[in-house]
Amino acid sequence: MLEIKNVYKTFNPGTINEKKALNGLDLTLNNGDFVTVIGGNGAGKSTMLNMIAGVYPVDSGSIIIDGEDVTRLPEHKRAKYLGRVFQDPMMGTAADMWIEENMALASRRGQKRGLKWAINKSEREDFKKMLSELDLGLEDRLSAKVGLLSGGQRQALTLLMAVMKKPKLLLLDEHTAALDPKTAAKVLALSDKFIAEDKLTAMMITHNMKDAITYGNRLIMMNNGQIILDVSGEEKKKLTVEYLLEAFSKLSGAEFTNDRALLN
């Protein structure tokens, strides 16, 4: 489903601010993999997701999604393969548009605008049914502006919109980091539910090691733009936070440093 082959990326090369973000990164995801991604500050986690999405061009190497080499494709042409949820709940939705208008845009992504662009009764009923799964009361607020929603409601809506078209790959970039613990737990549970029900392939960056262990069938740890640990299946189920911290120290030769890390 996803192949990242020997990808390098350096920001501000040849300057005092030079930063090697990805350093010969190799990663293969199989269909249905749900991979959690952890690592210290500057490990390359978000850069990796942004490279997959086409936000930045790679310096060298290749990225293949569902058998197609997308390495040189611009961001908007990769969008048909991807669903994305960002750390900031304000991203991913249009604040001045109604809930149903946002959902209509998501459901028609990749289609050309035409005479049938208006929302019909059948679609509205489908939107209500989908929203009811969030258990946030949004199914009765289709005409509410998204900007009036709470951060948690907005992030849950963004997640729902990201999976509506059953993307080839779902990218979750610390999508619960800005939420309170109770809301974060709800959005995580919804993420897990949608991924399982639709058999999606997904990558989730998280600063919460416990969540990284709990969710998904595979965990990777990054450092200095490379993957230093890759654990899956039964082995992943046996992981502990203490083991991960010890593994990071041994494999990287340094203490784990992430100023937002939650270790329990």
Image (cartoon, rainbow, N blue to C red):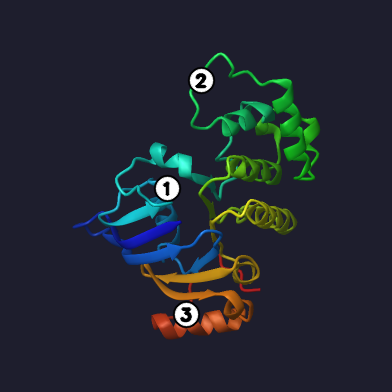
Asked if labels 3 and 2 touch by Cβ distance under 8 angstroms, the answer is no
Left or right, 48 with reference to 115 = left
Disc on the earlier residue, 3 or 1? 1
Q: Name the residue under label 3.
A: 248
Residue 257 visible? The answer is yes
Disc on the earlier residue, 1 or 2? 1
**Could you say whether the residue bearing mark 1 is in a helix, strand or loop?**
helix
Nearer to me, 103 or 232 = 232
Point 37% across, 60% down: residue: 4
**Could you say whether the residue bearing mark 2 is in a helix, strand or loop?**
loop
User: Residue 252 placed where, x, y %?
Assistant: 40, 80
Nearer to me, 188 or 31 = 31
Tell me if residue 91 comes above or below residue 204 in the rendering: above
Q: Quadrant of residue 182?
A: bottom right
Distance from Cα at disc 3 to Cα at disc 1: 27 Å
- Tally of marks: 3
Q: Mark 1 points at which residue?
A: 53
Left or right, 190 with reference to 114 = right
Q: Mark 2 points at which residue?
A: 113
The amino acid at mark 1 is Ala
Point 73% across, 25% down: residue: 122
